[in-house]
Image (cartoon, helix red, strand yellow):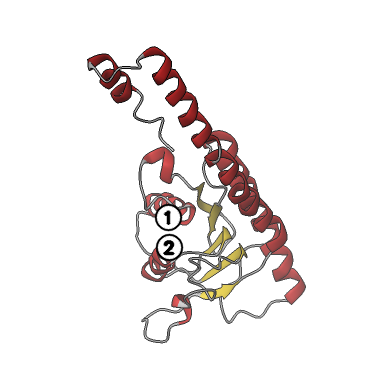
Amino acid sequence: MPPVEPGHDVNAAELAATDERWMRHALALASRAEREDDEVPVGAVLVSADGNVLGEGWNRNITDHDPTAHAEIVAMRQAGMRLGNHRMLGCTLYVTLEPCAMCAMAMVHARIARVVFGAWDPKTGAAGSVFDLLADPRHNHRVVVQGGVMAADAGARTTWRRCRQPAIESCRPTSARICGVVRAILYPATGPQARAFSATNSSCTA
């Protein structure tokens, strides 16, 4: 069943089933983000009014050295190239995490009909958590929002990632102490060799 445009009469159970189906697709993309690129696991898929995938992707900020390469932006860029148009009328964007302000405004500019997201983002969410940009009546286009679809599954991915980061960071002071010991043993003096060692191993700091 294709996504439903706002105002179209549809059975609520059918709509919920459609949303869950595409959210599972987005969750699979999120898993690939972490497995293939070691990115924050957020996935997105943009679906046309007749149920065709126009674009999909996952976070690529780290991989592409691009602060704008969120999953939603990646999917919309693909869709724009496929459509040959910057407008994506009647389309639904499914994303595993509540969109940020950047992505929310890109959806407004693209004239996306509806966004469906999984987990709420209490830090930077712009679809109701921190900001409510998509519902702002001052915009010349309103995006219909459905949040919390498969929220537990979507939230588990991002929560696990956030919990893992402190464990990785906690290793760095230990590495720094080891480097300090090696420096003291090999180059106890403060001459050129000691300075050269410090410069070469400048990353070994707490």
Mark 1 nearby-residue class (10 Å; few <14, some 14–19, many ≥20): many
| Quadrant occupied by the C terminus | top left
Closer-to-camera residue (55/101): 101
Element assignment for label 2: helix
Q: Is residue 194 visible?
A: yes
Residue occupying the point 35% across, 60% down: 86
**Gap between marks 1 and 2 measured at Cα:** 7 Å
Q: Is residue 6 above or below residue 82?
A: below
Which residue corresponds to mark 1? Answer: 73
Snapshot quadrant of residue 95: bottom right
Amino acid type at circle 2 is Cys
* Residue 115, horizontal then vertical, whole percent: 54, 68
Direction from residue 104 to residue 114 in the image, left or right? right
Which residue corresponds to mark 2? Answer: 103
Q: Is residue 34 above or below residue 94?
A: above
Closer-to-camera residue (7/163): 163
| Quadrant occupied by the N terminus | bottom right
Residue occupying the point 70% across, 70% down: 15
Element assignment for label 1: helix
